[in-house]
Every structure is written in C-alpha cells, then in structure tokens.
Amino acid sequence: MEKQKSFKHGAMEKQKSLKHGAMEKQHSFQERRIKESPGKRGDTILHMAARAGNPVHIEIILSEYSGIQLKDLISKQNQDGETALYVASEKGNIEVVREILMVSDAQSAAIRANNSFDAFHIGAKQGHLAVLKELLQAFPSLAMTTSTSNATALDTAATQGHLDIVDLLLETDASLAKIARNNGKTVLHSAARMGHVEVVRSLLSKDPSIGFRTDKKGQTAFHMAVKGNNVEVVLELLKPKPSIVNFEDNKGNTSLHIATRKARTEIVQALISVEGIDVNAVNRAGETALAIAEKSSHEEIAAILMEAGAVATLEGTSTT
C-alpha cells in the first residue's frame, strides 16, 4: 500500500513538473514574442532601445541572445531598412553604438538602409565625430563603403560642411577624395557647390590635382563653385591654377557663362578680374557671356561685362 502511494505521489510530482515546464516555456515564448514584435516603423525592441538611447537596456537585451539569433537581431532592418546600429549612429549616442559594436561584425555594420546609407554614412551626415571614430576603430573598412550613387561618407560629410569629419576621413585614407559618384562628381565638386570654403581648402591641401577632375558634363569643381554664392570658394579654387577660369565643359561653357546664367553678380565681378580670362569665350550654342546676360535681362551683369570689354556677338558667330 505504501509503495502504491509513493508511486502515485511520484507520478503526480512528475505531472506537476511537466506542467510547470510547459508553462515556463509558454511564458518564455510569449515574452520573446513581446520582445520581437515590431513597434512603430517595424522597429524591434533593439531599435526602440537604440532610439531611446539607453545603453543599459541595450546591454540587457543583447545578453539574452547568442549565436545566429544574436546576429539576426543586430542585422534586423525596420521598414526604412535601418538596423539598430544605424539608429544609434544617427542619434549620435556613442554608448549605445559601442554596446552594439561589441557583438557586430563588418558585414552587419555595413548594412544599408533604404536611403542607401549605412551606419557610418548617416553618422557622417549628422556630424557625429565621436561615433565615426568608434565605428572606424571597430571596422576601418567602413570608411570605404559607398551609397547606391557611389558616394562615400567623405562626400556626405563634405556636402554638409563637417570639416572635422572631412579631416578625419582624409587622415584615414586620402585616396577617398578621388572616388567619384556615378555622375562623375568628386567630393570637391560637392563641397564647392555648397560653398564650404574650409572643406574645399582642406581637400585641396591634400591633393590640388582633384580641382581638375571633371564630371560627366565635363564640369570641374570650379564650375560648381560659380553656381553657388560663396566668392571665397571661387577664389580658393583659382589658387592652384588660375587658367581654370577659361576651362570649358562639354557644352563649351566657361565659368563666366555659368555665373552669368545663374545671375551671380559678385562672382562675375570676381571672375573678370582674373588675369587671362576670356570675357568673349563662345560656347557650343554660339553664346558669349554678355549674350546670355542680355537674353536673360541681367542688366547689372551685362554692364559689368561690357565695362570689361565683352561683346554680345563675335564676327562669324550667331546666337540663334
């Protein structure tokens, strides 16, 4: 009788243990579902913690995963294609970036979002120098990644005028300045067009020859500069070789043609003072700069050009 009672007790205990185990597993499953269920924009719990900027929370989450599950978590992209590392880099939260990098590899760190930027590019765009240093220390190869337009992080930083990041990346690898986007434009084209004189100065100090690189339209960074509004950039780009003032693009336009068409009065004034400028250069359409000024009713620029000896038409040419 005692033996039978003991057997029943053992069976009941085993059943209770199995039931408890099943409940624990169910609880764990439900807990995991909550953790992995997408939030706004399809964010995982790691995305949300990165967005909140809580490194302690990040550490706790990461400690609960290992192996392939951990790799999947850090590689997971939301609806915008962003990983948690991308989010942290965009926010500029160095502690969160550091925590995620500890369990990342070069492949997951270089995942591009829908905008074709990876974590390194977005950090460069936002001007987060400390974040970029941390990313470079972990994976130096990130400096060479490109967007779908073949833009480097250096190009992205230069476009935004982030001089400290430009200098960091040039020190990392000066050859980055030679990488052109799909349209042929280099980082110098970008900085010149946006009028970032200190960035232009820094780029030229590393390699003055990039000032003569042309894009698919045959335009140099100097052509880009005269489209803008910063005379300082124009003067800076003239320093390596002033004769670039007469350089023609694929349509035969010199910088004077372009500045006139864009109605950049101050820049036109600066250009005509450059020794050796041809104020009567004719483009493929048979136009001089003065012909463009008159056609566009840029009266002040027309007056400046005429004072410099410009004519609307040259003998044997036609603007029709």
Image (cartoon, rainbow, N blue to C red):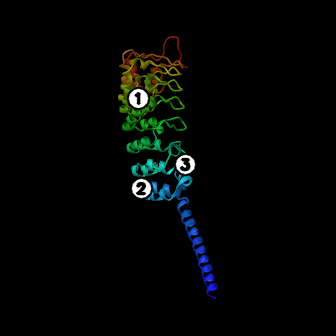
Percent of width and height locating residue 9: 60, 82
The residue under the point 48% across, 35% down is 144
Q: Earlier in the sequence, mark 2 or mark 1?
A: 2
Q: Residues within 10 Å of mark 2 (few under 14, many from 20)?
A: some
Observer able to see residue 262: no
Which amino acid type is shown beneath numbered disc 3? Gly
For mark 3, give the secondary structure. loop
Q: Are marks 2 and 1 in contact (CB under 8 Å)?
A: no
Question: Measured from the top left, where is residue 75 in percent x and y?
Answer: 54, 50
Secondary structure beneath dot 2 equals helix
Which disc, if any, is residue 279? none
Please give the label number shown on residue 264. Answer: 1
Element under label 1? loop
Name the front one of labels 1 and 3: 3
Residue that label 3 marks: 81
Q: Amino acid at mark 1?
A: Arg
